[in-house]
Image (cartoon, rainbow, N blue to C red):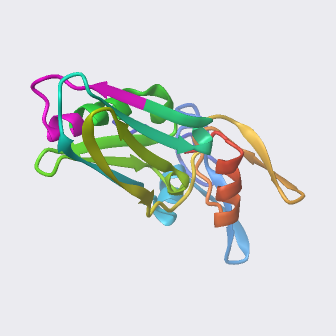
Amino acid sequence: MTFPFQGHQGNNQNPTLMPNFYRPVAGSGGVSLMSPQEYMAKYPLTPSSGNVVVGGTLASGDVATLDITNGVLGGTVSLAYTLTSSDTAASVAYELAQLVQDNPTLQRFGFSAEADPLTATLYIYQASGVGNFSTLAFSATGSVTGTVTQMTGGAGPVTPVENFIFTTGTSPRSYWFGVPVDVNYQTLKALVAQGQPVQ
């Protein structure tokens, strides 16, 4: 269900429905107001992605561990799965994907995962370019293996998960919860390195 956003001068939307998240966008000699939907259409998101191909010799009691490190996470989120006698490489990939999906910290910062049962591959995603600064690592007891491809390809605006002010050079900028912001590479790198709350 889609709710219309609160009105502003120049449109006919009901001003009591939702808060006004329209943002000023400069261009063509003036400043216009752009809704979050319009902003995301102009600056589309491309998720970052990486993967782990699970293989090797599996044994009950072995522990497979996936580590995801990123500045916005405050360090490393470590996810461990203990194998059972019925596990296959594909089921291990699936169980690790579920651990990613169920982790509240990863959810908050736009991480998600899925598994391909045909290739025993765990795919890890992050909603924007934030994920490009992630490091994935796989380790295991026993002879379980994981071939890692690091996360790349993310682009587009970042979305704050809380309000904060961040200074680049000498210019402070306000970031508002849920309002997407297009930033350049150096600003994005600094936001992630300093653990600012963006996804």
- Of residue 198 and residue 145, the one placed in the foreground of this image is 145
Q: Percent x, y for residue 171?
A: 86, 57
Please identify the quadrant where the C terminus is shown: top right
Locate residue 81: give its quadrant: top left
Q: Which residues are magenta?
A: 79-93
Would you say 149 lies left or right of 133 here? left
Which residue shows up at 86% across the image and 60% down it?
169
Q: Residue 197 at what x, y percent from top left?
A: 64, 39
Most extreme residue toward the bottom is 28
* Magenta stretch: includes residue 85: yes
Q: Quadrant of residue 152?
A: bottom left
Of residues 96 and 35, the one drawn nearer to the viewer in this rendering: 96
Is residue 194 left or right of 33 when viewed as pictured?
Answer: right
Instruction: For residue 4, say whether it is visible.
Output: no
In the depicted structure, whether residue 78 falls above or below residue 48 = above
Answer whether residue 132 is magenta in the image.
Answer: no
Residue 161 to residue 192: above or below: above
Place of residue 56 in the rendered image (x, y in percent of width and height, measured from the top left): 20, 44
Q: Which sits in the foreground, 187 or 164?
A: 187
Image location (x, y in percent) of residue 1 = 33, 35
| Left or right: residue 99 compared with residue 38 | left
Q: Locate residue 124 relative to residue 182 in the image: left or right.
A: left
Residue farthest toward the right in the current orientation of the protein: 170
- The residue sitting at 9% across, 26% down in the picture is 86
Please give the name of the residue rendered at 22% of the width and 26% of the height, measured from the top-left corner.
83
Q: Residue at x 50, y 50 (%)?
A: 135
Residue 68 visible in the displayed image = yes
